[in-house]
């Protein structure tokens, strides 16, 4: 989250959303390629709806909503806020236009600046902080979704050209980093903003364990594929094998075969900078939990639990170093090879699947009202991911951050790090 006053942070976050949408045409911004993908235009409108619904209408005297139909069109899943347009049909909303959505954003922004002027009440500040972090989530989703949209276009258009490669110092060969067991505290300590699912902070009991010093790479994945990883049912969970068969998985999402063998040159992948060859030394990306679990079995290892991951990351005392982490400000918009020694790539590059089901921490209670629907009602049939990725905004991720997706989804920037019991 940017430094400065709440009003300054509001302006910075809202401005970044528009910067991310700027390379896209109005036509780009209207497309929905699957149920999980939302059009760019919808992301821009929904984040605006959030501020209008939860801050301006109840807290700014005399506020007049921009258009009553927007309340129906741009509600996502808040049952307490009223009926909403079905998620799978967001792509058929040709109107309001992208120009009208820009007008909607300006209307709400001007009112929000008035609301945040001076010293707003604490509950307004808390809701505004939630809204800004919510918009940062949608900035990441915007890029995830438009990548899927552009990948479905046979012309394989470019969202933004890739920047020159960063000069990095190659890391040492991958190895295992040992962590002692014992009682460890995980979860957010309440000293700054966090989503409700990050708390309460509580103790867990861990056995000694080891984590791989780096993320699993595309080269590692090519070896898994060459050894029949996608053809060996004994490596897979039953649901995972069924998904792999029904979906026809033979490689990560966005990989396409260009040759007859499994060498690195025979595979291409689609990036936000367009298609290019698979690079063996960069982290594998766009894999499901099922694929990550199958790979771990093939490698004779396992996925870490979220408690193990957080304890290794240092908990709330160790926020990510955004100068080094490959997050959105790096501009790469793609995972990059590990650099340096020791435990690397904990923050940025790819969200790391864990072995933990998304469930409430002991003592968790959702907030009252519609905002209580933000996280708690999704605590079933999902798996936890940690660490952020290459399109996560700076200041948005922390060691206690719990992302979650259904185990069969792949369009997000997800990869894995191996774990094992300490030997």
Image (tube, rainbow, N blue to C red):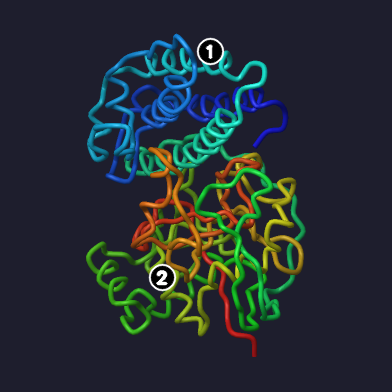
Q: Residue furthest bottom?
A: 423
Q: Out of 398 and 83, give the one closest to the viewer.
A: 83
Instruction: Pinpoint residue 331: horizontal percent, then vertical percent.
Output: 62, 40
- Using residue 331 as the reference point, say whether residue 358 is left or right of it: left
Position of 229 relative to 362 (above/below): below
Badge 2 marks a residue whose secondary structure is: loop
> Residue 99 occupies which quadrant of the picture?
top left
Badge 1 marks a residue whose secondary structure is: helix
- Using residue 165 as the reference point, say whether residue 82 is left or right of it: left
Judge depth for marks 2 and 1 and give the one in front: 1
Position of 71 relative to 341 (above/below): above
> Tag on residue 110?
1
Q: Residue at x 44, y 56 (%)?
A: 404
Q: Quadrant of the C terminus?
A: bottom right
Tell me the residue that label 2 is attached to: 261
Q: Quadrant of the N terminus?
A: top right
Instruction: Pinpoint residue 211: horizontal percent, then vertical percent.
Output: 63, 75
Position of 92 relative to 104 (above/below): below
Q: Out of 84 and 201, give the one closest to the viewer.
A: 201
Q: Residue at x 28, y 44 (%)?
A: 34
């Amino acid at each position: 989250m940017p430094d400065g006053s709440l009003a300054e942070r509001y302006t910075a976050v809202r401005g970044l959303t528009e910067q991310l949408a700027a390379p896209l045409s109005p036509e780009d911004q209207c497309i929905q390629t699957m149920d999980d993908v939302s059009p760019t235009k919808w992301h821009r409108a929904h984040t605006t709806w959030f501020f209008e619904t939860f801050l301006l209408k109840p807290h700014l005297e005399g506020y007049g909503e921009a258009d009553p139909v927007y309340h129906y069109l741009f509600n996502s899943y808040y049952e307490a806020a009223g009926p909403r347009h079905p998620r799978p049909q967001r792509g058929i909303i040709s109107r309001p236009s992208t120009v009208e959505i820009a007008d909607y954003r300006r209307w709400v922004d001007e009112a929000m600046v008035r609301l945040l002027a001076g010293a707003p009440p604490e509950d307004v500040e808390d809701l505004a902080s939630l809204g800004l972090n919510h918009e940062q989530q949608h900035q990441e989703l915007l890029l995830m979704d438009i990548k899927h949209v552009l990948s479905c276009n046979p012309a394989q258009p470019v969202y933004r050209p890739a920047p020159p490669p960063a000069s990095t110092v190659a890391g040492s060969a991958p190895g295992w980093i040992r962590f002692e067991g014992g009682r460890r505290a995980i979860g957010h300590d309440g000293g700054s903003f966090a989503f409700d699912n990050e708390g309460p902070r509580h103790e867990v009991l861990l056995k000694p364990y080891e984590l791989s010093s780096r993320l699993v790479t595309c080269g590692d994945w090519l070896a898994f594929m060459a050894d029949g990883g996608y053809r060996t049912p004994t490596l897979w969970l039953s649901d995972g094998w069924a998904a792999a068969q029904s979906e026809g998985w033979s490689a990560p999402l966005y990989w396409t075969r260009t040759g007859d063998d499994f060498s690195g040159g025979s595979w291409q992948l689609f990036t936000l900078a367009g298609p290019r060859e698979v690079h063996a030394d960069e982290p594998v990306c766009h894999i499901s939990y099922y694929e990550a679990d199958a790979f771990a079995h093939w490698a004779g290892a396992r996925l870490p639990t979220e408690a193990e991951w957080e304890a290794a990351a240092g908990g709330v005392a160790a926020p990510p170093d955004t100068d080094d982490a490959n997050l959105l400000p790096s501009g790469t918009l793609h995972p990059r090879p590990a650099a340096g020694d020791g435990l690397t790539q904990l923050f940025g590059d790819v969200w790391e699947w864990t072995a933990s089901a998304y469930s409430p921490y002991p003592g968790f209670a959702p907030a009252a009202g519609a905002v209580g629907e933000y996280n708690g009602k999704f605590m079933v049939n999902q798996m936890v991911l940690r660490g952020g990725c290459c399109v996560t905004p700076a200041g948005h991720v922390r060691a206690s951050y719990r992302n979650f997706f259904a185990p069969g989804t792949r369009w997000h920037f997800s990869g894995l790090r191996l774990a094992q019991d300490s030997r």
